[in-house]
Amino acid sequence: DVVYRRGIMARGNVRAVGLMANHIYERPNGIVETRQMNDFVAWYRNAHRDVFPVAIGGVEPIYGATVGVAEIRRMATELHLDGVVWHHHFHGTDLNEPRMHAFIEELGQHKLPAFLHFNGDSIHEEPAELEPLAAAFPNVTFVALCSLHSGNAIYQMRRVLDRCPNVTLDTS
């Protein structure tokens, strides 16, 4: 896998990248597989820090707030990951819901950023849904991933950016 990734990077003249936990993987045992995914991302970064200097873990909202907060704490204190990523389209949950508030509160305790995917075809990932969450946690940095996928999304995201200085964009 390392050789494969490095080959792709070399072809594109990319010297370093941040790694994110995958959102599409088998989870017959729930949090067990998610913990393994986070362990893998941490290992990757630690073993190849020159090429993969940033590692971002994940946690599934469907496991519940207690389990998710515990995993975020583990990612911060044991794995020393650099943030947590969500793709609500794949979780089937909403961006601005009570479990997310618990997760973001825990991120704030560890001064870690929240990375959130936005998919133009998903009702779970509307850019406007970021505003109440970001406003509720002004001391947490939110990184909006793939949020400029349509004219409407750009309009919504501009409003969020105007009102929430703690939100930043990835421009892919």
Image (spheres, rainbow, N blue to C red):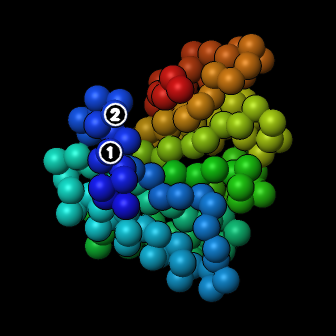
Circle 1: element type = helix
Foreground residue among 120 and 97:
120
Can you give x and y, in whole percent of width and height, for residue 7 in the image? 32, 45
Residue at point 71% right, 37% down? 119
Which quadrant would residue 60 be assigned to in this image?
bottom right
Badge 2 amino acid = Arg
Foreground residue among 117 and 70:
117
Can you give x and y, in whole percent of width and height, for residue 8 in the image? 37, 41
Number of the label disc, if any, that sits on residue 16: none
User: Where is mark 2, residue-wise?
Assistant: 11
Please give left or right for residue 124 compared with residue 79 in the image. Answer: right
| Marks 2 & 1, CB-CB < 8 Å contact | yes
Residue at point 66% right, 64% down? 61
Q: Residues within 10 Å of mark 1 (few under 14, many from 20)?
A: few
Foreground residue among 6 and 46:
6
Please give left or right for residue 3 compared with residue 97 in the image. Answer: left
Q: Is residue 81 visible?
A: no
Residue at point 30% right, 55% down? 3
User: Where is mark 1, residue-wise?
Assistant: 7
Circle 2: element type = helix
Q: Residues within 10 Å of mark 2 (few under 14, many from 20)?
A: few
107 up-or-down from 70: above or below: above
Which quadrant would residue 127 be assigned to in this image?
top right
Please give left or right for residue 119 compared with residue 112 in the image. Answer: right
8 up-or-down from 120: above or below: below
Q: Is residue 164 visible?
A: yes
The quadrant the N terminus occupies is bottom left
Please give left or right for residue 133 compared with residue 153 in the image. Answer: left
Badge 1 amino acid = Gly
